[in-house]
Image (cartoon, grey):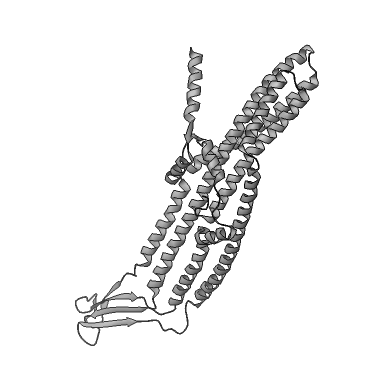
Amino acid sequence: MNKLAGVFIIISSCMVAQREMSLLDCENAFQQNNLQLLAEQYNINMADADILQAKIWELPQISGEINAYNPEAKKLFDIGHAKGAEITQLIYMGGKKKNEIAFAKSNKELAQLQFSQLLVDLRTQLRTTYYNLYYEKLKLENTNKQLGYMNELLAAYKIQSAKGNVSLKDEVRLQSIVIQLSNDKIGINKNILEFEQTLKLLTGVRESIEPQLSETEVQDLFASQPFGDETELKNKALENNADYQYNLKLIENSKLYAQWQKSLNVPDLNLGAGWDQNGGTFKNEVNLKIGIPIPLWKSNQGNVEKANYAIRQNEKNADYQRLSLETKVEAAFQTWKTQYEQLSQFKTKDLENLDLVYDGMLKNFRRGNISLIEFVDFMDSYRETILQVYEMRNEVIQSAELLNQLVQTKIFY
């Protein structure tokens, strides 16, 4: 009874550790829980704080003056007869504040584009990992089915080999298939563990995620076609790709920065008022104070030159990013097209026929209608073929996701 209870607890814990989730469920969890996304959001908040800071003026300065020593009365701190006070405010000239605020707002737009690109990249990673896990699970299921039968067959052959009813060579042939299947299983399990860990990080879900994907949904994925030809996809990518838009915005940002640095060459005005009890021409004198640096040279010329070079640099980088994006879209589209056409030649019926032949070979081998060599050759071919079919299907979806990541708008209908 205790043993049964222990087994039940182990099974229950395994069941609890798994959570069936659709792709939509994973995306919702990702948007709510992803720590990278939440951390990146703070860059936008910090950019808002920079805008707020750019709007703040320098504080006015107030100063006072009192007598330290009166030589006539030979009196220290003769405050009653000699004191004064003044207040000054720095007045920004040349549109400095306006330019600084415009530059800070541009930085926020850059932060928003960086957030958008991170969102796209992480969502693509989530979707590709989800599909990778789905197909690795299918591979594991099929491999376990083959391995279960081959282990039973090998066990039977070992018994017969020990009795001398079959040759050791036949036993070794079966052993080689079992070893190959076992190696496949090890590699598949390793991939599954890696994909499960990635999904946990992306979604914040602590349980291992079991993909919930119906065959109808899979067929709908294969039936969808990209809207437009290669040229249209390139144009859409240039309009919507956040990474490329970031590089374009960076040119505008560097121009605003250069304008701000240029305005720093304009001298600022110090405006103030002062009161003096006895030190001026008149008693209780109130004076207007104006101060401005003498513009003998441009004190910020080096930074202006540096900012102008940054504009040219960002223009070249944007040209490169455009060429890179167009090249990537072209390659991704051609890759998807090639893989899709290749998969289209292999119909669902062909996979069903392959399973029918597999079942038929098992039955005929049991009945002794085919030799062990024929059976082993078929099993080895079937093992490789079934893995390749799943890989082909997965690659079509992966290339479509890459195209989505580059174009960043709905292109598959």
Question: Residue 342, how many percent across, how many down?
Answer: 66, 45
State the residue in front, 165 or 188: 165
Residue at the image point whose x is 65% and y is 32% from the top? 353
Work out whether residue 133 can be spotted: yes
Work out whether residue 185 can be spotted: no
Q: How many marks?
A: 0
Question: Residue 221, how many percent across, how many down?
Answer: 54, 44
Q: Quadrant of residue 86?
A: bottom left
318 vs 186: above or below: below
State the residue in front, 271 or 218: 218
Question: Residue 405, how many percent across, how many down?
Answer: 54, 52
228 vs 250: above or below: above
258 vs 294: above or below: above
372 vs 389: above or below: above
Judge from the rendering whether residue 283 lies leftward or rightward of residue 322; answer left or right: left
Judge from the rendering whether residue 292 lies leftward or rightward of residue 304; answer left or right: left
Residue at the image point whose x is 69% and y is 23% from the top? 362
Residue at the image point whose x is 62% and y is 26% from the top? 145
Question: Residue 323, how many percent across, how many down?
Answer: 60, 63
Judge from the rendering whether residue 180 lies leftward or rightward of residue 300; answer left or right: right
State the residue in front, 224 or 60: 224
